[in-house]
Image (cartoon, rainbow, N blue to C red):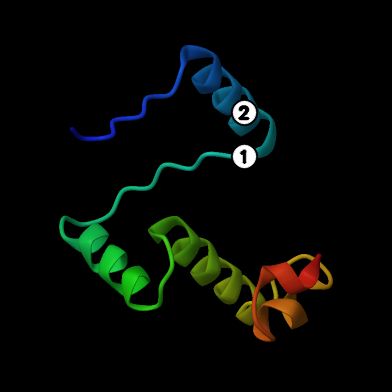
Amino acid sequence: MSDTRKYTEAQKRSAKKWDAANLDRVSIAMPKGKKDDIKAAAAAVGESMNQYIINAIDHRMACDNAAPAGYTEAIMEGGLDNAK
């Protein structure tokens, strides 16, 4: 028998409430096939596609001097976690 754990409605509501309070959502459009390319590149370095995109944006902002104060050095030295 397979183990099919399901979230309760209360757990779903709680997760949705936490997401709304702590996360911003962004929807982007890209050429067909690009999503698969990004997913493969992320997997190759052991990251989720979401984290891969965030890291790419952080790196670009640092290179463009568009990152908030203190973030540029941390991003270039290994990621946003170092800036906190």
- Residue at 54% of width from left, 21% of height from top? 11
Amino acid type assigned to the residue bearing label 2 in the image = Ala
User: In which quadrant is the C terminus drawn?
Assistant: bottom right
In this rendering, the answer to whether 49 lies above or below 22 is below
In this image, 11 relative to 66: left or right?
Answer: left
Which of these two is toward me, 7 or 53?
Answer: 7
Residue designated by label 2: 20
Q: Position of residue 5 (x, y in %)?
A: 36, 29
Q: Position of residue 63 (x, y in %)?
A: 62, 81
For this orientation, the residue located farthest to the front is 1
Categorize mark 1 by other alpha carbons within 10 Å: few (<14), some (14-19), many (20+).
few
Spatial distance from mark 2 to mark 1, Cα to Cα? 6 Å
* Residue 27 occupies quadrant: top left
Categorize mark 2 by other alpha carbons within 10 Å: few (<14), some (14-19), many (20+).
few
Q: Position of residue 13 (x, y in %)?
A: 55, 17
Residue designated by label 1: 23
